[in-house]
Amino acid sequence: MDPTAYLATITSEAENDFIFNLGIKDRPIWLGGYQDDGAAPDEGWHWVTGETWNYTNWAPGEPNDWRGTIENALAFAFFEGTGTWNDAPDSTRYLGNGGYVVEYESAPVPEPATMLLFGTGLAGLVGVARKKSSIQKNNLQRGTK
Ligand SMILES: [Ca+2]
Ligand SMILES: [Ca+2]
């Protein structure tokens, strides 16, 4: 069977660091968060997995529904390049040179905190089982201006 795969969800600083350090840098990378239609900018957010929306790492001034734009999708804030988040329009045009992070699980799935408790030697073993995230460049064309 194929592993369960989905846009990456982030529920802790450790996990945010883990994913950002895959090499996100200053690119807009989709994450597995989405927002209810019509909700205030900072309300009504969910993870695609149904995990509790608790940890957040918004960039300064985000989320903001920028200039009245409907921004109900979640991405790393490319304009910060520090692993903070931006609410973004649900549009391929937003991505530009970006992509997305896919998270897939293989049992057992230790939590990031567990991973950190082990020394670096063991972290490798645990980390592989925990989360095989990878950045996949998307092949979507840029929107024309
Ligand atoms: Ca919004
Ligand atoms: Ca925004």
Image: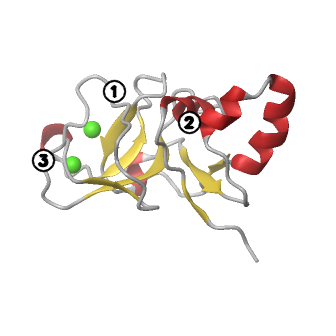
Is label 2 in a helix, a strand or a loop? helix
Q: Which quadrant of the structure image shows residue 19?
A: top right
Under 8 Å from ligand 2: the CB of mark 1? no
- Residue 112 x %, y %: 61, 38
Q: Mark 3 sits on what residue? A: 40
Under 8 Å from ligand 1: the CB of mark 3? yes
Mark with earlier residue (3, 1): 3
Mark with earlier residue (2, 1): 2
Q: Which mark is residue 74?
A: none
Q: Amino acid at mark 3?
A: Ala
- In depth, the one of 95 and 130 nearer the eye is 130
Q: Which mark is residue 59?
A: 1
Mark 2 surroundings: few (<14), some (14-19) or many (≥20) residues within 10 A: some
Q: Which quadrant of the structure image shows residue 1?
A: bottom right
- Residue 128 x %, y %: 79, 45
Q: Which mark is residue 15?
A: 2
Q: Amino acid at mark 2?
A: Glu
Label 2 – label 1 distance at C-alpha: 17 Å
